[in-house]
Amino acid sequence: MLDLPRLLAGAATLAVLLLAPLSAAAVVLEVPTHHATIQDAIDAASSGDLIYVRSGRYEERLVLRNKTVSIVGDGMGHTIVHSGDADPLVSIEGGQVDLVSLSLVGSPWDADVGSWTETSKQGIVSKDADLTLANVEVMRIHNYFVSAEGGTLDIANVRLHQGGYAIQADIGLMLEHCEADIWWLQVPDPRIDHVVMVNGAAEPLPPSELRKVVRLTDSEIALSRLSWGDGVVVFSDAIVEVIDNTFVRDVVAGASTVRGIAVSGVRSEVTVRGNFIHRAPIGIQAQRYATNRVRIEHNRIYDSINAGVRLHYGDADAVDLGGGPLGSRGGNQFCRWGASSAVDLRFDSFGTQSLSALGNSWSHPSPPAVIHDHYDDSSLPPAIWWDFFQQPLDPCLTIQWPDPIQPLPEPLLPEIVQPLP
């Protein structure tokens, strides 16, 4: 299959792809030169073939069953596959599929007004397949942008958004017992409720079955503007690493339970490290986690209107904010500007053990002022090792803000030529 690092280092042109290693029997099928539609090329392709789709708008749905094939376009906004049907825009079952340098749009094109007109329910649906998405844009989807059940999912430079359409989507990436490596996911649109959901609808795994690993790194995610939603939400039976990402919400005021990162199920191991979480009402939440293990370290959590970290139900040894049994090195930095009623750390219905939170920088010179526990509610245990708090570093005075997530420019997709003859 394709060499993704080489593709991402430069333009994914046909000349570059032809240099990629293909099997001796593999061929390049061109659309529309060799085949009138992409689906015709898929049906004609043999294992290991490459389908090159020239610039143009292709109104069709794609179905791949047990295919090992690469589909490569001329780039986002140039090779556009679109359909407004209720069925998925791309359906994949079994096999190994690469989708590279494409725009996938869940809408018909209205030539009279020169715009997209609708949304589809689902974008890409993959079951028991090894799927790679690189330099791909998925837009105008109402329910799931990408759903992967079983198999593997590799993502590099993928953008999810609604294309200026004022409708809220349910889920960006729906991962069900799927091994996933997600790098440079870009979600500039706050119209997605749950951007990455892990095992939200999956049946629990039997104890003998290995849990899948999901990694999200170096990504930029705009959080939902509604009163609910998550950047990442983990349910049961997963090993998840959320590392070096940015989560930003562009709405500051108002009651909301939007969470940057949430662990809401059981039997998962989650590492949350090096993330910047800005204006999420709840930065990080662990809930119902008696059998979970959540390690939180070196994150910057700023301006949460509810809590920077919220721990809801469970035992303290399931969470480590620094110096505890899970190996967290602490280093979390909390800052509050306008959220005067918020706290850095909130316990709700917590267990009976103390929590380790060593080596963190709090938003107040007196940490008890920004920690909600037994001293604020007698029904909660004293859950902090008070004597080991590091003095705050005044992070609000030294913040180096990253570039904010910018909305996509208009027009979202440039006007392009029809497919070449």
Image (cartoon, rainbow, N blue to C red):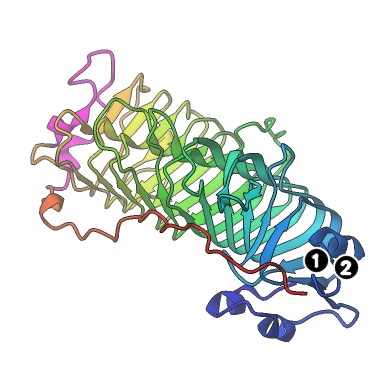
| Residue toward you, 117 or 195 | 117
Circle 2/circle 1 CB separation < 8 Å: yes
In this image, 227 relative to 394: left or right? right
Position of the C terminus by quadrant: bottom right
Residue 228: which quarter of the image?
Answer: top left
Q: Position of residue 109 (x, y in %)?
A: 63, 51
Amino acid type at circle 1 is Val
Sequence order check, earlier mark of 2 and 1: 2
In the rendered image, the vertical position of residue 376 relative to residue 346, given as above or below: above
| Residue found at the very far front of the displayed protein | 112
Picture residue at 72% right of the left edge, 33% below the top: 206
In this image, 247 relative to 383: left or right? right
Picture residue at 44% right of the left edge, 37% below the top: 230
| Crowdedness near tag 2: few (<14), some (14–19) or many (≥20) residues, C-alpha within 10 Å | some
Start and end of the magenta stretch? 367-391
Picture residue at 51% right of the left edge, 46% below the top: 162
State the residue position of label 1. 69
State the residue position of label 2. 47
Q: Position of residue 398 (x, y in %)?
A: 13, 58
Amino acid type at circle 2 is Ser
Residue 69: which quarter of the image?
Answer: bottom right
| Crowdedness near tag 1: few (<14), some (14–19) or many (≥20) residues, C-alpha within 10 Å | many
Q: Position of residue 50 (x, y in %)?
A: 79, 72
Mostly what secondary structure, the magenta segment? loop
| Residue toward you, 379 or 263 | 263
